[in-house]
Structures are given as C-alpha cells and as structure tokens.
Image (cartoon, rainbow, N blue to C red):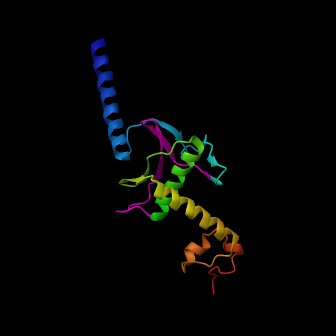
Amino acid sequence: MAITIGLALLLLALVALISALRLRAATGLPWAPVVYRDTNAQSPERPLVARRIGLVGKPDYLIERRGYLIPVEVKPGRNAARPYESDLMQLAAYCLLIEETTGVAPPYGLLRYADRTFRLSYTPRVREATLALIAEMRAALDNECDRSHDDPARCYGCGFFAMCDQALRDP
C-alpha cells in the first residue's frame, strides 16, 4: 500500500515537473532567477529611478543572468514578425535605467511578444539613441505638439483629449 502511494506521488510530481518545463519553454525566456517582477498588483515593485537623467520606469521583469540584470518587457497581445520600434525604445530605456541605478550596463534586454522573444543588444549606439529620444521628448513637452494622426479612436483614448485644441471631435 505504501509503495503504491509513493509511486502515485512520484508520478504526480513527474507530471507537475513536465507541465512546468513546458510552460517555462513556452515563455521563450531564458532559465534565470527573476529578481524583480512588476506583474503582481497586490505587491507592486518600486520603480527604477535615475534622477540624473530624469527617468523613471518599471520593467515587467528583471532577471539575473551571468552577473547582469536583464530587463524583460512582455507584450502578450502583440504578434509581429519584427519588434515595434517603440517597444525597442522602451526596452532600451529600461537598460539605461539599470545602468544608471546599478552602475552596470546590461548587455541586452528581452522583448517578449505572444509567440516570440526578441533580443535588443544594449550598445553605446543604442544608449545614445535612447538619451537623444529622451531629450527630444523633453523638448516636445516644452513646446506645443501637433496631432500626428487622423484616427478618432486613438484621439478619444488620449489622456489629453479633453484639453486638446486639435482633438478630433464628433461633427
């Protein structure tokens, strides 16, 4: 009887292990300890803050791999053959935040879409492009920006819709 229960528990543990391995493989992410997770609304992580450059952000995950913190941004609703430029810049900003807050630049960041994972090498060129984009965005905040689209749904969903003099209104 004890042997039967032991074998049943061993079989159950084996099924759970196989299920966990399949789930982990489906994420497309490397096997690495997760040291930061901004996916739990019950106990959210503190944001990363780089006061020197005025940047704050919360990556979905930070994993530790070979002594480096690697940012992981997950976009489960996206399904594209190539990553969107805006998603890559968001990931690059997280790399910059890690570099500024820890003093150690990550070698890369990971962007996970619904069915694939993209890797962004965090090079000096990517770093400079990110800093330039941040400066451009800051300058745009100081100036009035023209609406850059003709999409009513996008317009209605904008946080500035109520106060925008270029908003697409109903006729």
> 157 and 57: which one is in front?
57
Q: Examine the rendered structure and indicate whether residue 105 appears above or below residue 15.
A: below
Picture coordinates of residue 127, whole percent (x, y): 51, 56
Nearer to me, 26 or 98:
98
The residue nearer to you, when weighing 15 against 115, is 115
Q: Is 71 colored magenta in this rendering?
A: yes
Instruction: Name the image quarter holding residue 134.
Output: bottom right
Name the image quarter holding the N terminus.
top left
Q: Hey, which residue is sitting farthest bottom in the picture?
A: 171
Measuring from the top left, give residue 36's x and y in whole percent: 53, 40
Residue drawn where x is 42% and y is 60% of the image:
78
- Per the rendered image, the range of residues in magenta is 56-84
Q: Would you say 79 lies left or right of 171 here?
A: left
Q: Is residue 1 visible?
A: no
Residue 69 visible, this orientation: yes
Residue at 61% over, 66% down? 137
Name the outermost residue toward the front.
Answer: 124
Image position of 47 with respect to 163: above or below: above
Question: 163 or 62, which lies in front?
Answer: 62
Quadrant location of the C terminus in the rendered image: bottom right
The location of residue 71, given as percent across then percent down, is 49, 47
Q: Picture quarter containing residue 40? A: top right
